[in-house]
Amino acid sequence: MADTFLFIVLTLDATLRVSTPLILCAMAGLFSERSGIIDISLEGKMLMAAFAAGTVAAMTGSPWLAFFAGVGVASLMALLHGFACITHKGNQVVSGIAINIIASGLTAVLGNAWFKRGGQTPNLSSESRFMPIELPFAEQAGSIPIVGTVYKEMISGHNGFVYLALAIVPLTWWVIFRTRFGLRLRAVGENPMAVDTAGLSVTWLRYRAVMICGLLTGIAGTYLAIAQNAGFVRDMTAGQGYIALAAMIFGKWRPWQALGACLMFGLLDAVAIRLQGVSLPIIGEVPVQLIQVLPYVLTVVLLAGFIGKAVAPKAIGVPYVKER
Amino acid sequence: MKGQYDGAGDNDVSNGTKPLPRWIDIGLIPVINVCIALLVSGLVIMVIGEDPWEAVKIMIHGALGYEEGIGYTLYYTTNFIFTGLAVAVAFHAGLFNIGGEGQAYIGGLGVGLAILLFDTSLPAFLLIPLAILAAALFGGIYAAIPAYLQAYRGSHIVITTIMFNFIASAIMVYLMVNVLIKPGQQSPESREFSEAGQIPFIHEVFDWVGIEITHTPLNLTIVWAVICCVALWFFIWRSKWGYEIRAVGFNETASMYAGVKPARVIMLSMIISGALAGMVGLNEIMGVQHRLLLNFTAGYGFTGIAVSLMGRNHPFGIVLASLLFGVLYQGGGELAFDMPTITREMVVAIQGFVILFSGALAYMITPWMTRLYNRMQGSGPAPVEAES
């Protein structure tokens, strides 16, 4: 019984860790898509940020410089996306694909050229990384049954990024639904013409949304490279940007629901690792691939309107043309 | 979505300048865009500390300078023709199929299953059409599901096809590891096909007539690729169905008034698109590997997007773009060999730049070109300042 309890607590602990980049990217995507800009380049921006952070951390040994490098590079990619989609009214999906492919190729080429380790950056010492934070009284609380165990094993001992990601969700909600900027952001994603008529700049609003998206994907990538892991590895995002995209859609473009989807997908991931080769009672051995593929299948099913209905912002994917 | 590729942006007749003639719009501008992409790639090579000009020379020699290089280049070209055509067909209906990778994967599964089932009982001249059918069927059905969901359930094809790429990959891993693996073997590969289940290599064909050439993976599938190009051109521009596809892509509402059913067109174009992508499986599985294995699609599906954008969704353009990417792939391999600081992934980056400049930023230079053209003509009114 105690074992099962500890297993559950540890699985949930792992869930929080693997959900963090998903949550950050889902919120990033939410800002962008709410403003009417499709962003399938979460993956690419996160990968570029991870590479930049890993590189700078390895070269300077400073995690903060690495953090700014990660966020900076992701923001540059976001600006590029904005330049193509907003300024030049290019196809948003094409631009997103371009960024993903450029990121995948460029990080591998530059990583190999600079460090000669097959695309990896050197392993980082703990001084040049962001390390887990022990919350106060975690040791003492460990002796208290249940509540103490949950506090020590699951709530405490995470990276600062994990808490940051969890804090960004209510912040996103507040910005999107309770501020003037958020109202305008939503409006520009639903009916840019109306926003324009009201005398607000559609371009500037969308650029700001895209920049916030870049900032958040940058944080996610930095977390991957210098907090969760000790360095950049080739293609280390491994599709998590797409899972985050799926989670955002699954959450119907709403912060809390998207958080729920991220945690669910994170849990599936954490469970998949633990269930590998384990035979369960009644069902028998569950193929890992089945669990891994569930986020994608669920999103497809949701989008097809079989469980509820996910309605995208109305003006999504349509470049705004001021005059005819 | 289609309109964004065809419209000349916001710089048309309305502001008093002359529109660009066709040869600039569809001939010169795409070439300039590709050149910008290659220039940026050259900058990356300079950042690494190598000589871009040297890199270009190595790549061109590696891809076209000797028999083996040419063979490999054309073998890659074959794959890109299929995936490029696949993306183009969907584009013409205004759809963005980024599921080419998954459809190629499942198409290959179809080819593999067909041959594993029949290669001991059927002769080659029956097996090849059977494999083509299987590739088309599997790839087509795998594309039909997202198409159905878009046409009848209102989900977005871009998102669904992305998800389907991941699902395809999971299906293949499961099948290869648990079901199709040759017993008593570590790596997840099926047994090797018998002689009848292999498409002849070009060097074998030359051998029949007594000419000896270097052995390369290039096989007769390339002939099928060329046939597909011609057939697709005929289909899109000379058949009723192709007309309907273009009508929907051009203006869905107007096409409905003309009696076209967009839902049917979505299904049709996506099934053809998936079937074409599935042909990568024919080239890879039946033509080269002669066994079913993992990851044989190697990103060809995504390259198809770049190829189609570069080739302006026209079979002829696609053949040219496929050749260029064939050169890049084969030359890139040679480059990685000769310049160890540059890895094969350089080609992936180049591909990304091509998609960026020929796709997302395709009309970036149009206003400049229009101004330049008008100034050179001398007759147009004074250049109008860009509004934004």
Image (tube, coloured by chain):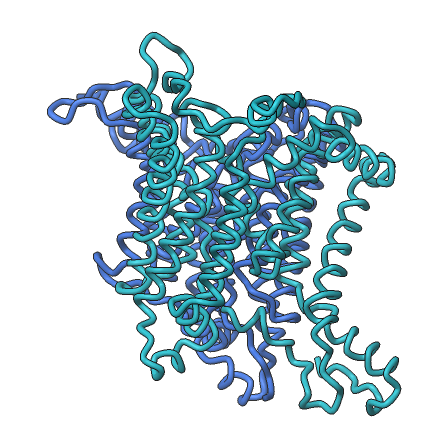
Chain colours: A blue, B cyan
The image quadrant where one finds the N terminus of chain A is top left
Residue sitting farthest toward the left:
A282
Residue sitting farthest toward the front:
B209
Residue B153 visible in the current orientation: yes
Examine the image and state in which quarter residue B148 appears.
bottom left
The image quadrant where one finds the C terminus of chain A is bottom right
The location of residue A247, given as percent across then percent down, is 38, 51
Residue A52 visible in the current orientation: no
The relative height of residue B99 versus residue A195 in the rendered view (above or below) is: above
Q: Residue at x 31, y 79 (%)?
A: B259
- Quick check: B244 left or right of A184? left
The relative height of residue A191 versus residue B360 in the rendered view (above or below) is: below
- Quick check: B48 left or right of A119? right
The location of residue B232, given as percent across then percent down, is 48, 57
Examine the image and state in which quarter residue A105 appears.
top right
The relative height of residue B239 versus residue B118 in the rendered view (above or below) is: below
The location of residue B312, given as percent across then percent down, is 60, 61
Comparing A19 with A89, the one in front is: A89
Comparing A130 with B296, the one in front is: B296
Q: Residue at x 48, y 31 (%)?
A: B284
Q: Residue at x 65, y 56 (%)?
A: B356
The location of residue A44, given as percent across then percent down, is 57, 46
Number of marks: 0
- Quick check: B98 left or right of B124? right
- Quick check: B338 left or right of A200? right
Comparing A237 with B384, the one in front is: B384
